[in-house]
Image (spheres, grey):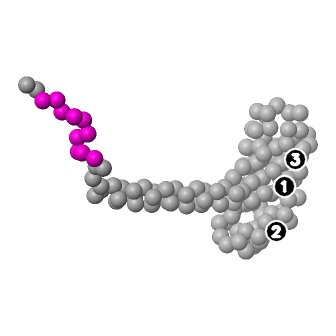
């Protein structure tokens, strides 16, 4: 078991290395417009999970996933060269669900804003249900 802080720092370094490797060394035409969003290591530092997003259609995302799968060996060797750690972790690429979650949250926020606008429109012409001043006034004699 490695120190959690060390695993986090190494994960950040692996994220940088993977992003640079994909940009500079991978020439696969299937590789779309990709962003490496995170890299996490298992507690024993044996497995690295790299999260990514792809801009474009679902077909482009599938093609990018295939390109990443075929580039795993090169990416892993580059991680080994540039980190200098004793054992180079295996690499797994997982498409990040963040853009989907953001879209769902944006849709929910838009629905809430629309409901607020409708409520304000209805309240604009509303009148009190009882007297305008519900408190009884004492006559000062």
Labels 2 and 1 touching (C-beta < 8 A):
no
How many numbered discs?
Answer: 3
x and y percentages locating residue 25 in the rendered image? 77, 61
Magenta extent: 130-139
From the image, tell me which residue sits under label 3. Answer: 47
Labels 3 and 1 touching (C-beta < 8 A):
yes
From the image, tell me which residue sits under label 1. Answer: 92
- Gap between marks 3 and 1 measured at Cα: 8 Å
x and y percentages locating residue 21 in the rendered image? 76, 57
- Asked if residue 108 can be seen in this view, the reply is yes
Q: Nearer the viewer, residue 85 or 50?
A: 50
Along the polypeptide, which appears first: circle 3 or circle 2? 3
From the image, tell me which residue sits under label 2. Answer: 66
Looking at the image, which residue is at 82% across and 44% down? 41
x and y percentages locating residue 82 in the rendered image? 81, 46
Answer few, some or many: residues within 10 Å of disc 1's Cα (few below 14, many 20 plus, some between 14 and 19): some
User: Is 136 situated left or right of 4 in this image?
Assistant: left
- Gap between marks 2 and 1 measured at Cα: 12 Å
Q: Which of 97 and 91 is in front in this view?
A: 97
Secondary-structure class at tag 3: strand
Secondary-structure class at tag 2: helix
Looking at the image, which residue is at 27% across and 53% down? 127
Quarter assignment of residue 83: top right
Quarter assignment of residue 68: bottom right
Outermost residue toward the left in this view: 141
x and y percentages locating residue 89 in the rendered image? 88, 47
Looking at the image, which residue is at 76% across and 38% down? 8
Label for residue 119?
none
Q: Is residue 134 magenta-colored? A: yes
């Amino acid at each position: 078991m490695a120190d959690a802080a060390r695993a986090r720092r190494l994960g950040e370094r692996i994220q940088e290395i993977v992003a640079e490797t994909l940009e500079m060394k991978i020439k696969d035409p299937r590789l779309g417009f990709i962003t490496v969003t995170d890299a996490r290591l298992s507690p024993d530092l044996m497995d690295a999970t790299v999260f990514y997003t792809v801009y474009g259609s679902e077909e482009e995302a599938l093609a990018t996933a295939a390109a990443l799968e075929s580039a795993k060996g090169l990416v892993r060797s580059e991680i080994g060269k540039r980190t200098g750690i004793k054992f180079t972790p295996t690499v797994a690429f997982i498409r990040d669900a963040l853009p989907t979650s953001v879209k769902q949250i944006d849709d929910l926020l838009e629905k809430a804003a629309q409901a607020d606008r409708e409520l304000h429109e209805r309240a604009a012409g509303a009148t009190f249900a009882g007297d305008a001043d519900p408190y009884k006034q004492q006559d000062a004699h």
